Image (tube, helix red, strand yellow):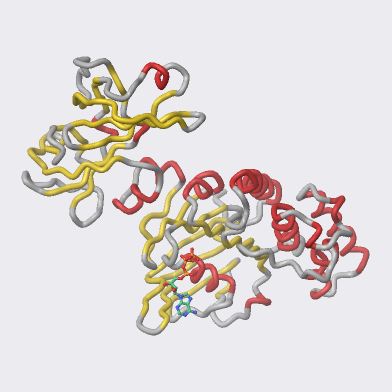
Amino acid sequence: MSKSIDVELKQVRKTFGSNVVVDNFSLQIREGECVSFLGPSGCGKTTTLNMIAGFLEPDSGEIWIKGKRMNGVPSNKRELGMVFQTYSLFPHMTVAENVAYGLKLRKVPKAEIKRRVSKVLELVKLPHVADRYPKQLSGGQRQRIAIARALVIEPSLLLLDEPLSNLDAKLREELREEIKRLHLETGVTTIFVTHDQEEALYLSDRIVVMSSGKVEQIGTPLEIYNQPVTEFVHTFIGKSNKLPAAVESAADGVLTLRAAAGFTMKAPDRGRPLPAGSAVNAYVRPEKLRLAAPGADAGEANSVPGRVRQLSFLGAFAECEVEAGSARLTVRVQTAGEHARLSPGDPVTLIWEPEDVFVFSGEGRTA
Ligand code: ATP
């Protein structure tokens, strides 16, 4: 049986003065899903979340949660769990009192509060800090308590607004694993706002990529990464080498492109046909480029001669910058072996498959 729709936004629009901050935003979130709003600063993620939370009213459009229309319903009547970027714990209350707060407001009996607080502290693996004050906790612990406080009321929806932004890199990674585990264990429908693409890819069942108040694409992490529908989505998620080019010919689903860098390459024609001479931007990701010996035969693949310019060791992998024609392309290489064999100045052949080339027309959509 298909899961029910927990949250629905229908053509939601929000303006501040003459500034359209969220435009024509429509989305359905299924029960138990974790959906991320991902986009650069100022694209309208928090505004959208605040409308779902009931802190802001949309100018037009509708918001539904668990089958009920929420327009005009105050935030405290929406039964939401919320966690923000800044640690929002009450400093004068102990951890246990902080976590119990929402249950007290709802007049839950004392014994029941005690049981639920200790259960949720077990869930976030911090039962031993119940009697401490927030200032006696690390940043990561405070955010886990903030999550516990949001979960303890058994919310219909959990809203997380950049909850990891104030943490250092290592803690961010730990806590995102924690959030994923908690989501799997509780099954609570979750919306996660972030501008960090890795966080969104890691945590989400689906990602809503936003720019300038508009939805660019909604899809699973794999769809967003491998089938971007706009140039914005492709370049915002992951690294990619940009090659401005002109279409030389298009036949049988294959485009032949003349890159401004001075070489030709093949690419799949994924969308509407482009006439010869059209200006496009072609992209290929660093992990899709391979290095072979100078003069190597690439068979059906794209290949150009190049020269190693620079090597950067990044731990698990390395990046090799290769000059090919007038372009400089970043190639991801293995640190075991490949990186050690390369030196700046080495001649190489760059090889990549036509299907790994993404082509976007002047309007920014997949060609
Ligand atoms: P960030 O990642 O920086 O939080 P965001 O994608 O969440 O960004 P929003 O906070 O939703 O973006 O803001 C979207 C736009 O709306 C921005 O241009 C912001 O300046 C503007 N904005 C937000 N709140 C208000 C307000 N209360 N009054 C006027 N403009 C606002």
Residue 254 screen position, x and y as percent: 16, 34
Q: In the displayed structure, does residue 278 sit left or right of residue 268? A: left
- Residue furthest toward the bottom? 17
| Residue 51, above or below 195 | below
Image quadrant assignment for residue 139: bottom right
Q: In the displayed structure, does residue 365 sit left or right of residue 144? A: left
Residue 270 screen position, x and y as percent: 23, 42
- The residue shown at (46%, 56%) is 38
In the foreground, 10 or 132: 132
Image quadrant assignment for residue 354: top left
In the foreground, 37 or 185: 37
Marks counted in the figure total: 0
In the foreground, 18 or 6: 18
- Residue furthest toward the right? 111
| Residue 354, above or below 198 | above
Residue 89 screen position, x and y as percent: 74, 66
Residue 69 screen position, x and y as percent: 55, 75
- The residue shown at (71%, 62%) is 150
- The residue shown at (78%, 62%) is 135
| Residue 179, above or below 156 | above
